[in-house]
Amino acid sequence: MTAPRRVTIADVAEKANVSTAAVSKVLRKAYGVSPAMDERVRAAMAELGYRPHTAARGMRGQTYTIGMMLPDIRNPFFHEILEGLSKQLDGTDYQVLIGPGGSESASQAHIMNAMIDRRMDALILVAPLGNRRDLEETAKSVPMVVIGRHDRSPDYDAVVDDDLMGAALVVDHLVELGHRRIAHIEHKITGRNHPTTLPQSVRAEGYRQAMKRNDLGSEIDIVASTYSEEGGYLAARELLARAVRPTAIFAGADVAAIGVFNAVYEAGLRVPQDVSIVGYDNTSFAALGPISLTSVDQDGHAMGTNAARLVLERIESKRTRSVLLSTSPTLIRRRSTAPPPA
Amino acid sequence: MTAPRRVTIADVAEKANVSTAAVSKVLRKAYGVSPAMDERVRAAMAELGYRPHTAARGMRGQTYTIGMMLPDIRNPFFHEILEGLSKQLDGTDYQVLIGPGGSESASQAHIMNAMIDRRMDALILVAPLGNRRDLEETAKSVPMVVIGRHDRSPDYDAVVDDDLMGAALVVDHLVELGHRRIAHIEHKITGRNHPTTLPQSVRAEGYRQAMKRNDLGSEIDIVASTYSEEGGYLAARELLARAVRPTAIFAGADVAAIGVFNAVYEAGLRVPQDVSIVGYDNTSFAALGPISLTSVDQDGHAMGTNAARLVLERIESKRTRSVLLSTSPTLIRRRSTAPPPA
DNA sequence: GTGAAAGCGCTAACAG
DNA sequence: CTGTTAGCGCTTTCAC
């Protein structure tokens, strides 16, 4: 019941007949330890089952902890990012811990502060809502990489997928199939002015630009909703109730596309014969037979790997200049898109 | 670029003309501070924008951090638990941080150690794989609550939903509809012997017992697979290839049920006319129109809230005896179940 | 009611 | 190459 006192660096030092400083050096693989001493210390550590006390290390040095702020745990796309990140960190001393950020700027700021208060060595933020100035402010106190946003800042690194191109791929695909009345569902958080560099805003802008480029400027039809099943459902209901119904609906995220399916079936319409549906993120369920959703694929795994690399470079301060890493999406065509009804 | 030195307790003490000890007391709402001093200290903290350095506090006292180990970030059911937990912790000084545990006993042990090394005040483990002795071992060094497992231990608290009853609800419902050939898909991790108290094992056992109770012992048919889309898909393919095909498939989790849908459609069969499908967890997509999956609902939110309560009680050591909190599931009937074909 | 001082476990100069 | 010695920011006796 009573926890035995934890083994400390002092216990190891005593056992190995060396100073605590020596043990610390072995721990950090620091310069200036003879092979003989190194071995003795390691042996003592093993024998005592010593594990460094990360919190204490953090008081002077690093905590070997990287905080990842996620607005929504469930999003399968975020999971891919996490996997890339974890794989890259595997084998290093670093550990990822996830902070649930929620969908509000305030709750996200809260968890970011909590992570900084806990002395995390670096922060990885996925599609954070805060304005750029605030982000730069926190980037001044901790190495930081932002995933998903298109801002470029001198203070933090950015890893993005080209959402402008992704939206263009979708529109061009639909136009090629013969569609003209192509609607878009955007994620639009109510309340404060949110940055236009968020993925959802860029996707909407990409849709707009692509429509114009295809001489369909007059057909532009955007419904503001949310990237969620319910959001997609409600937006699609609105679209299907129009006097002239769209023949294709481009949802900014797969989860929303699922809601669109729902509304379309409910209206007694068929996919893709009556309405074509396109999603974004190419999440695992998009490939499922009964759904078979045409979607835009971003390489989340690579984004995670890149974020880890950038963050480690920063921590080890091999680099002080900021970097923006942009990857290209691809379109995955499936059975949810077809030519419009004659 | 250069981070300004953080405000510390010493700065606040100086500003308020008191000792650091006094500031610490105010911070901890500890006994022995006069209202006047309290106010002065608070004013100084506000003026300087002081935020306590959690890592440093942890060296002597608490870190005000609760670690939650999740085997799979994506599972929407886990998200419900997290929400309940967060809501309960809201307004307290505590913060949840999520440790990605992965699907292996070793990776889970790794993240648990990482959390302990970081001096977290308590651990909440969701369906951990380790054997009970190991769990009890770690429970000796930190307050702990285990969610989902049916073990009862003197060393940690447990929050479970009655999976035995959940499985019985499913079988009884199908039997009532007239089914006899009811198959079950179990989550079975390869390799080591895993505890039989895991939710997946208890659900399988509940299925077995209920089948026997309904005089269908000879019809028991369990396929070992995984709770995932692919796992459900593969298991269902196997089941549908049987000489005598089951008329109902009970997947141990909604995600697996989605894969079952997939396989059923692919085989040219209809749901529920040819095959009935039941899931478990009643995750949000189960309610979606095109899916409309009959499923077992556990109140994840309540489980999270309860876990938080138990953990706080332990931290504040109001309680030393362990508790097991079991809630009851309910069956949500939807369109994926119907009488078997004649 | 208040403050001085000794740590918590580790790192980082700095001597030797 | 090795050990001594200050701290990191906060908590906690224990005098006053």
Image: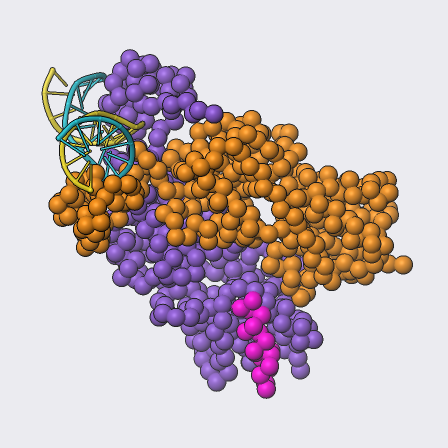
Chain colours: A orange, B purple, C cyan, D yellow
Residue A154: give x, y in percent of width and height. 55, 29
Residue B25: give x, y in percent of width and height. 27, 25
Residue B217 visible to an observer of this rendering: yes
Quarter holding residue B150 = bottom left
Q: Give the residue at x 78% y 53%.
A: A173
Q: Give the residue at x 64% y 35%.
A: A197
Q: Give the residue at x 36% y 16%.
A: B44
Quarter holding residue B241 = bottom right
Above or below for A42 versus B7: below
Residue B334: give x, y in percent of width and height. 62, 63
- Taking B124 as reference, is A12 left or right? left
Comparing A280 with B77, the one in front is: A280
Q: Give the quarter of the figure containing the C terminus of chain B.
A: bottom right
Quarter holding residue A208 = top right
Q: Which region of the structure is painted magenta?
A: B230-249
Q: Is residue B247 magenta?
A: yes
Q: Give the residue at x 60% y 79%.
A: B240
Residue A190 visible to an observer of this rendering: no
Q: Is residue A174 magenta?
A: no
Above or below for A157 versus B215: above
Q: Which residue occupies the extreme bottom position in the image?
A: B243
Residue A290: give x, y in percent of width and height. 68, 65
